[in-house]
Amino acid sequence: MALPDPRLGLVISYSYLWHHEHNAGRDEGTKSRTCVIVLAIENQADGSLLVRVAPVTHSPPGIAVAALEIPAAVKRHLGLDDARSWVVLDEVNEFAWPGFDLRPIPPSRDRFAYGFLPPRLFDQIMAKVAQIWAAGQGKSSPRD
């Protein structure tokens, strides 16, 4: 199977590097995790695609406004587990697509995406992302 196109709202498997890990000098994530593509833009000069992904975690957010819970019905639709999960909105990884850190979804060896978030949920995520980043509270970790 070919790699998916990096479209907004696509939920992928990715080796995410947390911002605190990046600041500590690490350059690799510790595990594959579910992430949501929140930005995908083409570089007009060379045609490369710049992507930003927001991580999904089972850990309840320390700051409630910096995350949005994924409804159980959406998790079922995507084929994710039943545990509560949140999209973290105040940090992202940024990389040139497809990068080195896309991971297959087990047990597959060639499937990298779970599917898309529903448009209404993705719009809520993007509204909160815009608010957080406009306030200067977002953190980006480059992965190339």
Image (cartoon, rainbow, N blue to C red):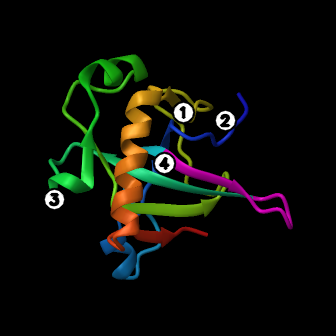
- Tell me, for residue 113, which label it has, or none: 1
Q: CB of mark 1 within 8 Å of CB of mark 3?
A: no
Q: CB of mark 2 within 8 Å of CB of mark 1?
A: yes
Tag 1's secondary structure? strand
Residues shaded magenta: 37-48
Q: Is residue 108 found inside the magenta-colored segment of the image?
A: no
* Residue at the disc numbered 4: 14
* Residue at the disc numbered 3: 63
How far from the left and from the top, in percent, is residue 58?
22, 42
Q: Is residue 12 left or right of residue 3?
A: left
Q: Which amino acid does the dot numbered 3 rest on?
A: Ile
How far from the left and from the top, in percent, is residue 124?
36, 39
Tag 4's secondary structure? strand
Badge 2 crowding class, 10 Å Cα cut-off, few under 14, some 14 to 19, many 20 or more, is few
| First reached walking from the N terminus: tag 4 or tag 2 | 2
* Residue at the disc numbered 2: 4
Q: Is residue 11 left or right of residue 22?
A: right
Task: Please report the residue visible at 58 percent of the width from the left and 30 percent of the height from the top.
Answer: 111
How far from the left and from the top, in percent, is residue 8?
56, 41
Badge 4 crowding class, 10 Å Cα cut-off, few under 14, some 14 to 19, many 20 or more, is many
